[in-house]
Amino acid sequence: MAWINVPFQLLTLENAENVMPLVEGRLNGFPLRLVVDTGASHTCLDKASLKCMAPSALSRKKKQALDTETLKDTVMGVGGRRLSHTVCILPSLHIGELALHDYMVIAVRLHNVNKMLHWIGHPPIDGLLGCDVLQAYGAILDFSTGCLRFSVADSCGQEVSDEEEVSCRQEVLNGQDVPNG
């Protein structure tokens, strides 16, 4: 088994105990900022970000690619609030070096989340990396190394080396803003 290691930063909110892991990704060559959200059943991207990065994903007919059960799924927010959403199929979504092709995501409005982040001095996020991806790839969120690890099939059956594991280490930003990059 091989691993893809994706460094994450801790986005500190009100205090050092209130943090969210943040990974970088790419969609159609555009950089993405995604919060790793183990409470989200599906990966969600902001509708405004999708309009800029993948406008065709919002306008495509999804019925031909999805069964009717998927289309009827309800997306619930914190507190059981129903969220308005659109199902999108993205031709290519990258989280670090993990490439997801023809991947289904939920497009939601993250305006209020980004408004709160702006209010406390952070740049906006583009989405939530949900349990659909985390579970599919046996993800390990390692706070001691600042690394999100994805298990991927490797025809050679190679394990990750200690050197690769060390290269994923980074300093976790405690009490500091995450850079705008």
Image (cartoon, rainbow, N blue to C red):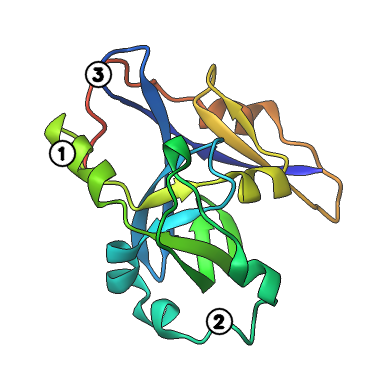
Marks 2,1: beta carbons within 8 A: no
Where does label 1 land, which residue? 118
Q: Establish if 52 lies above or below 149.
A: below
Q: CA distance from mark 3 to mark 1?
A: 12 Å
Where does label 3 land, which residue? 14
Q: What's the amino acid at mark 2?
A: Lys
Q: Establish if 62 lies above or below 38.
A: below
The percent position of residue 131, horizontal first and vertical second, equals 61, 44
SS under mark 2: loop
Q: Residues within 10 Å of mark 2 (few under 14, many from 20)?
A: some
SS under mark 1: helix
The percent position of residue 90, horizontal first and vertical second, equals 51, 72
Please report whichever mark, 3 or 1, sits nearer to the chain's N-terminal start: 3
Quarter of the view holding residue 158: top right
Q: CA distance from mark 2 to mark 1?
A: 33 Å
Residue appearing at x 51%, y 69% in the figure: 87
Marks 3,1: beta carbons within 8 A: no
Q: Which mark is residue 62?
A: 2
* Closest to the observer, 81 or 111: 81
The percent position of residue 135, horizontal first and vertical second, equals 70, 43
Q: Is residue 180 visible?
A: yes
* Closest to the observer, 15 or 95: 15
Please report whichever mark, 2 or 3, sits nearer to the chain's N-terminal start: 3
Location of the C terminus by quadrant is top left
Q: CA distance from mark 2 to mark 3?
A: 39 Å
